[in-house]
Image (cartoon, rainbow, N blue to C red):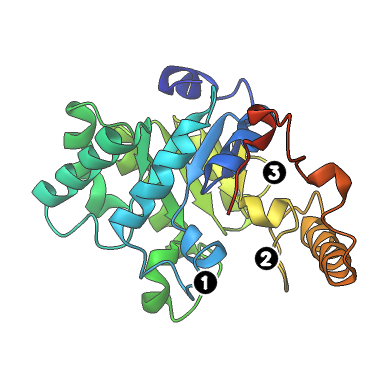
Amino acid sequence: MNIKKIRESKNQDRLVMLTSYDAITAAIVSQGGADIILVGDSLANTSLGMTSTLPLSLDSIIERCKAVCSHSGDALVVCDMPFLSYGISEEETIRNCGRVLKETGSHAVKMEGGEWLAPVIKKLVNIGVPVMGHVGLQPQHVNSYGGMFIQGRTEEEALSILKDSRELVEAGIFSLVAECIPEELGKQLTEETAVPVIGIGAGPHCDGQVQVISDLLGLTTGKLPKHAGQYASLAQTAQEAVARYSKDVRMGAFPGPDHCFPLSGINNHEAMHNGA
């Protein structure tokens, strides 16, 4: 997958995007058929135990993005720009976005924001940094919202989202994430936007969909967001496996003969493992 194919998918093929934060899930997502892997700043909540995406550092997401790119297969990798890694000045934004592409091997960056971001996006695109836009609910603005709320429910908010999207497209974005907006607005946005619109909580009419991998696989404990699609229950499976392992260790049943090495005739290749 590449930027050109993403653009050409508009009104042709539905795009599949999933988040990933490490090499193991990157391989799973890629081999499972996803077109785009998003190294989202949601790793702050899902992997690092933070209460919002705001504390996540640029260094942290670069480290994770490197791991994802090492096992991303044919999928296009997009890296989220963390809070305050962009928007302070054009120079710093360009430097940080360039650093992400140079150090990680990712193909594009994603930034939350509307019309105010258009000038720097245009400059980034002109120097060869592909940008994915993000409108609707923007988690990095959680303090401004006073919480995580559906956006675009009033006529004023809806018109603002449509206007922001037009400005971002004109600036050169290759695709647009629309998060947590009413289904009707998601449909209108998709119809009026020249680049593929990838929805998360934006209804079924978008050009593609994105989900958080831990929600999809059932690794998240607690209540899922309304828009999340859960396709497995791996947290329960994993807990049961750990419980069986714990029981076997305490009873002396593990390790068994198959997990032990003889004194002589050892095959060095058998000893190779991913040890602690």
Which residue is disc 2 drawn over?
A: 225
- Residue 197, numbered label: none
Task: Return the residue nearer the eye: 154 or 274.
Answer: 274
Relative vertical location of residue 148 with respect to residue 263 in this rendering, above or below? below
Q: Which quarter of the figure is the C terminus placed in?
A: bottom right
Nearest-to-viewer mark from 3 and 2: 2
Residue 7 can be seen in this image: yes
The secondary element bearing badge 3 is classed as: loop
Dot 1: element: loop
Among numbered discs 3 and 2, the one appearing first in the sequence:
3
Give yes or no for contact between labels 3 and 2 (Cβ–Cβ under 8 Å).
no
Tag nearer the camera, 1 or 2: 1
Please indicate whether residue 212 sits to the left or right of residue 240 in the image.
Answer: left
Outermost residue, front side: 264
Q: Mark 1 points at which residue?
A: 49
Disc 1 marks which amino acid?
Gly
| Residue 237 horizontal/vertical position (percent) | 84, 58
Q: Which residue is drawn at 87% across and 46% down?
A: 257
Q: Which of the two residues, 16 or 33, is positioned nearer the viewer here?
A: 33
Query: What residue is pinned by disc 3?
Result: 204
Q: Report, in whole angstroms, how far the alpha carbon at label 3 lies from the one at label 1.
A: 31 Å
Q: How far apart are marks 3 and 2 (CA)?
A: 16 Å
Q: Residue flagged by tag 2: what amino acid is it?
A: Pro
Expressed as whole percent of the image width and height from the top left, the position of residue 158 reads 47, 58
What is the C-alpha distance between the residues marked 1 and 2? 17 Å
